[in-house]
Amino acid sequence: MPQRTLVIGLDGCSWNVLEPLLATGELPHLSRLCAEGAQGVLESTIPFYTGPAWASYATGSSPARHGIYDFMMLRPDGRLSVARQSDLRAATYYQQLGREGRRSVLVNLPIDQDGCDGAVIVNSWLTDGDARRILPMGKRERYRVLLDAYRTFPSATGDVEELCAIEQARFDLVRELFLGEEWDHFFVLFSSTDWLGHTMTGRYLRGDAEAEAAMLRLYRQLDEHIGWLRERAPDALMAVISDHGQCEEQVVVRVNSVLQDAGLVRELRSVEAAPSPFFVDRRSERQTQIKLPSAIGRYRRNERMWRLGLAAKRALARRGLSVTAASPHVDRLGSRAFSPTDASFAVYVNHLVDDDIERAREALLAVQLDDGRQAIEGVWTMEELFGRPRSGDLEPALFFSPAVGVRPSAALKRPIVRYRTEGRGCHQRDGIAILHGGPVAAGSLEPASICDLAPTLLWAMEAGIPIDGDGRILFEAFEPEFATTQPVREVDEPFVAFQELMDSDSSEVNRRLRELGYI
């Protein structure tokens, strides 16, 4: 019988946070998984941010192959909008499972999903509105009470009791899906580990008692959820993973200010003239603020963008973030080079000007910290990092990796801010990987890539592995007899994005969408 698989995501978790918690003895289920399974560092993508990293997990591909570089996608008119399933240029592993008649349940995977064959999907916070919170939509009535209690954002990211309440509601839904749906693969992402990490990782790593208690409170609850899932699927190959890690935030580097000093960024003083309909990632130095255009009503002429703008404002309010007018603002159409958001870790260059690319690279590499380190450890072109040239202005010209403790910002103020922001956390590239159960061999894993999970899951489930992926099978995590006898079956099937299906006028397409419950 083919192997079932169960994947649990702990967003933003890293060993520097988890190991001291394990040492308390109060996380018995995670401790057991580590002792009996294979565990090691899971390297994230570049950019090591939630959107592109989880897309790489889902596709087994680098951002250059799957096309997701951020939460927000740069569009032809210079605006930004949420990354959607139709933006993916590579098939996901659960689409491949669906093609082979295998069933998946996915909860909170950060891609705005439209669904696929053989999958029940509870969308993440990237989804606009509640109508598509669960797909197929025919499932909504069955889980209505649990969905009504399901929240995607806290009102305060440092309120551990509220975070625990959110994850309990998520788990209540997960539990019913776990028991009530047929599945060969089950995925759930718990987001609060990242939210709490951004608020207090620095304090926690410095031994602050209040931060330690909050971390332990959240992880103790998640440990119970993990134990429940493990006990009720003893036959499943389980993976506990994260998309990146956390370290203490010490410095903010304002990338667009660095580029502006190099003569590459053009500034828009008027919010009314800004090309973005609603999302400008600017954070104040000591407060968690995201500033948006104030005249959101003018987008009524584009009903979808107007709705997205209001949804963004509501979502930010649920996270305790203030909404104000954004000025000054980067002119994404008129600038020669710019970084669109705090999460992109990328520079876009208009009109493919090689000289501007090199000027941007030199400017970023020249930023130094007080201790003499480079604030940006590395800067690469698409070809240098991923092995192919970019295909146009809507793809990044450069990717960068900040030094440990450095948070990039897209704001236009002073280029660099040197201070400790009250013990906050910021992203680091190294996450966690724990594999347990079935044919997994106990021991330490060499550092693996988040792209390796999709081919490993497909291989363990005896499913076909797309030949154009960037990940590899983690043979070393398994018992030698299984690793040497389990067949590897590669497939080369054309990938058709869901949006392409929707744009088609085929009666066959309409039939398929109707059968799936989407129309």
Image (tube, rainbow, N blue to C red):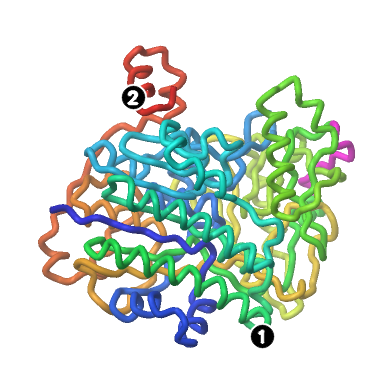
* Residue 209 image label: 1
* Residue 316 image label: none
Tell me which amino acid carries mark 1.
Ala
Q: Where on the picture, by quarter, is residue 205?
A: bottom right
Callout 2 environment at 10 Å: few (<14), some (14 to 19), or many (20+)? few
Marks 1 and 2: in contact by CB < 8 Å? no
Residue 267 in sight from this viewpoint: yes
Query: On screen, 428 above or below 312?
Result: below
Cα distance in 3D space between marks 2 and 1: 54 Å
Residue 374 in sight from this viewpoint: no
Badge 1 element:
helix
Furthest-right residue in view?
Answer: 269
Q: Of helix, strand and loop, which mostly describes the magenta segment?
A: loop
Q: Front-most of 518 and 440?
A: 518
Image point 65% across, 44% down: which residue? 348
Q: Where on the picture, by quarter, is residue 268?
A: top right
Tell me which amino acid carries mark 2.
Glu
Query: On screen, 192 above or below 350?
Result: below
Q: Where on the picture, by quarter, is residue 498?
A: top left
Image position, residue 147 (x, y; %): 52, 44
Callout 1 environment at 10 Å: few (<14), some (14 to 19), or many (20+)? few
Placement of the C terminus among the 4 image quadrants = top left
Answer with left or right where residue 177 lies relative to residue 79.
Answer: left
Q: Front-most of 311 and 289?
A: 311
Give the labeled residue for mark 2: 515
Answer with left or right where residue 233 lies relative to residue 241.
Answer: left
Say if the magenta span includes residue 268: yes
Image point 84% across, 60% down: which residue? 414
Image point 25% across, 42% down: which residue? 102
Say if the magenta span includes residue 257: no
Query: On screen, 15 above or below 5?
Result: below
Instruction: Give the magenta range.
Output: 263-272
